[in-house]
Amino acid sequence: MSEGKVYTYADVASHSGKKDLFMVIHDKVYDATAFVDEHPGGEEVLLDVGGQDATEAFEDVGHSDEAREILDGLLKGDLKRVEGDPKPKVSAPTSSSSATATDGGMGLGLYAVVLVGAVAAFGVYKYMQSQEGNA
Ligand code: HEM
């Protein structure tokens, strides 16, 4: 394993074949060669991003934690960006994992609705109590 090596975008771009398939995800360089045939999403999509920045493609699918573990095992090294290289597709790992982000947001929103509902119900209850007292 040559983990920890630093690759330029041009290095990565020269490994774009099925038998030699590098890709960039979150500014790390992965060697997907051994995984191409096993990818549940098919080899075609991996070959499409071979030698390129696959961050967006990878994140758009909303890959599972298991997929990310596999990815960890394919790590080759870090990407060193030089002048004129394509811009990073996604800046932060979490920013485009919309599925999980939305889930969290929905959860909070739901809590807020329940809380507001509870407060309103309590208010009505109190009001009715005070009405009873007056009657
Ligand atoms: C080396 C990088 C990659 C690894 C290790 C990987 C791994 C996996 C794994 C384990 C799954 C099964 C579902 C899951 O666990 O999330 C999966 C599904 C999938 N992957 Fe990837 N993937 C990689 C790159 C990509 C890329 C670049 C694309 C481009 C679009 C892609 C597209 C898909 C699709 C569409 C599925 C869904 C297949 C289905 O559910 O029928 N993957 N991938």
Image (cartoon, rainbow, N blue to C red):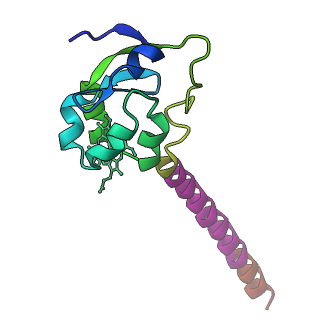
Residue 32 location in percent, x, y?
27, 30
Is residue 112 found inside the magenta-colored segment of the image?
yes
Task: Locate ligand 1 by image quadrant.
Answer: top left
Residue 88 location in percent, x, y?
56, 26
Q: Where 37 falls versus 127 (above or below)?
A: above
Quick check: 30 left or right of 80?
Answer: left
- Point 61% across, 11% down: residue: 83
- Point 30% across, 31% down: residue: 71
Which region shows up in magenta? 101-125
Residue situated in front as seen by the camera: 59 or 113? 59
Quick check: 41 left or right of 35?
Answer: right
Quick check: 100 left or right of 129?
Answer: left
Residue situated in front as seen by the camera: 77 or 116? 77
Is residue 62 found inside the magenta-colored segment of the image?
no
Magenta stretch mostly in which secondary structure? helix
Q: Where 62 falls versus 18 (above or below)?
A: below
Residue 127 location in percent, x, y?
76, 78
Tell me the quadrant of the picture where the N terminus can be found.
top left
Q: Where 121 falls versus 45 (above or below)?
A: below
